[in-house]
Amino acid sequence: MNFKKIFNSFSLRTKFVVSISALLITTIILFSTYLSKKQADGFRRELESTSETMIRMLAINVEYGVLFESKRDIEDALKILSQFDYVKYAIVSNNNNKILATIGDEIGVFNRVRKIDKFDEFSDNFCMDFYVVDSKGKEYIELNYPVLSNHKDLDREILGITAGFNDQLEITSTTEQIGKVKVIISLESVNAAIAEARNTAILLSVLVSLITTVIGTFFIRIITKPIRLMVNATNKISQGELDHHVPIEQQDEIGQLAKTFNRMVESLKESRDEVDSYNKMLEGTIQIRTKELETIQAQLIQSEKLSAIGQLAAGVAHELNNPLGGILGYAQFTLEKLKNNSPAKITKKEFDNYVRYISDIEKQARRCKDIVQNLLRFSRSTKNVEFEKVDLNILISETCTFIEHQLSMKQIELKLNLDSNLPDIQGNPGQLQQVFTNIILNAMQASPPGTSIEIVTRFSPPLGQFNGTVELLFTDQGHGISKADINKIFEPFFTTKEVGKGTGLGLSVSYGIIKEHGGEIKVESDLNKGTTFAIIIPLQKNETESDKPSKQYVLQN
Amino acid sequence: MSDKKNILVVDDEDVIREFLYEVLSEDYCISTAKDGDEAIEHLKSESFDLVITDLKMERIQGEEVVRFSNETNPATKVIVMSGYASLYSTSQSVNNGAFALLSKPFTIQELISSVEGALSS
């Protein structure tokens, strides 16, 4: 599982190289191990069979030497053996275990394993092989072979002549053992040969593996290069670069894949362009719709405002009619006086009176102008809302001039409780006046005669992180708002008035305007006791600091 | 001065009060009051042939002045003035005990004919 995880994290190239190298090296190791084992076995078998032949020959050659206990004859035979390096030790003894001759040095045996019993194909006697390890860890084969003779009773001289003939042929029923030979053969040279062969095999394996890995890597690189190009291209395309093209010009499977891929990217690009252009179109449509919506919203606010102005009309008329009465009256009066007079007869007193009348006309005309301007400012379109410095106390007073006559007509008392320390705020006077008018008119409509409406302004000075707020409270003693309705009053088109009497937009528009001023409107109401609307407008940081520092100072004291 | 008729002009607007004074003072004896309270004080202490009062004033309204005048001296005629042309009809005012309604702004002719009409009836 872990190995699999590691393997999977490799790149394709590494995977190829690792798997092919692993396969190759395993094959070579298995193969060369098998071969060297086979070769080693062959070497050993050959040495064993050579040694067996040798000991058999020796046993025959020393027959007479043993028979006559002739040390010289035996030593002659042994000398032949000493020509072979691997013969470490040879000993010839008779049946009484008397050592007749030796060559080489006896080895200190550490371990001796009987390896094989072989029946001699010529003599029915067996040759005993032992696998021997000496104390130094060196390996040997120990061979034991009987010395046989069928001339036990013959004299040395007689037999000396015929010895050569009887070597291999004369095996008869009278044959008996007269002694034994033991030869110890060193496996050192064989082992060395085996080791050399094995080393060569290892060296060859390593070389072949290296060469294969290098060549494999090279070929795999050729194969994986287009794949890498594909991967790069895919990355770029997934990042949105649909103009990217896979630069592969091959006819093989990868080339075909690249072609298909390029075709796919092209069609992807086409559909993306289509989506883009559709999006652009949609964006345009949304912009147009948003603009339309903005226009409609502005119209809605404007119409709500005009509705408020409509409700104010009586108050405005009264406001205008008083100065107009003066203007009309004095103008007429002066004109009549002048008609009944002549320039030559005008006395100083009359002249002064005319001046006074005309001054009055001018004064009243100015008053009319102010009223109209105030009204115009209120009714001005809210399309482009610009904020300016606003003194809310003045704004409240101005708003009330239009309404207070209506209030007094309904016998509702208007109480103003304005904080003279109120700092200016940044706002739009027309919009704010719309809000105030709306709230006061609502209060008026909810108030029975003989009650009062109180308007309070107050200032919470800044403290630490708090920048300070300006609060306006409008409290009436009217019929109040039910709990069911109080959560809905700021919703557009919600109205408790009769059909045709209210647009249901007044408070929702007011809410929007106060939100635009960064403030909030809150309402508290007790059924049949009255309602308080609170407008809280937070001050911006520099408004209190730079505008009215002296007031701040006084307040903090 | 005694042959002149007494007229009380009540209006919280200085300009209206002054204008009525200017127009009428040649032919009539004019007293002025700038609100309902003052008017009622005048009505308590003097007798007037005619009261010309605005309807909308702070504190005591014109209607109250009309009511008080009619109660204390029914012979006194009352003309009411209003800037709320659309809100008050003549019949409504007459029902409330007024002789006539003068809608602001009014001409001198309208004023004089109303005053003369009231005093001659």
Image (spheres, coloured by chain):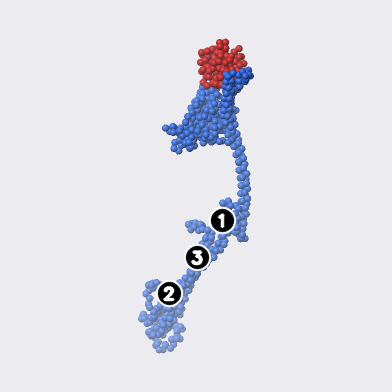
Type of the residue with mark 3: Thr
Task: Give the residue drawn at x 50%, y 69%.
Answer: A204
Which element carries disc 3, helix, strand or loop? helix
Tell me residue A424's x, y (percent): 50, 33
Q: Is residue A320 above or below residue B2?
A: below
Camera-near label (2 vs 1) is 1
Tint applied to chain B in the drawing: red
Identify the image quadrant of residue B96. Answer: top right
Q: Nearer the viewer, residue B10 or A281?
A: B10
How many discs mark residues in the rendered view?
3
| First reached walking from the N terminus: tag 2 or tag 1 | 2
On what subunit does the disc labeled 3 rest?
Answer: A
Task: Give the residue drawn at x 39%, y 80%.
Answer: A103
| Residue, disc 3 | A26
| Residue, disc 1 | A232
Neighbor class of circle 2 (other Cα within 10 Å; few <14, some 14-19, many 20+) is some
Which element carries disc 2, helix, strand or loop? helix
Which element carries disc 1, helix, strand or loop? helix
Tell me residue A194's x, y (percent): 46, 72
Q: Are marks 2 and 1 in contact (CB under 8 Å)?
A: no
Residue A174 showing in the rendered view: no
Tell me residue A162's x, y (percent): 44, 87
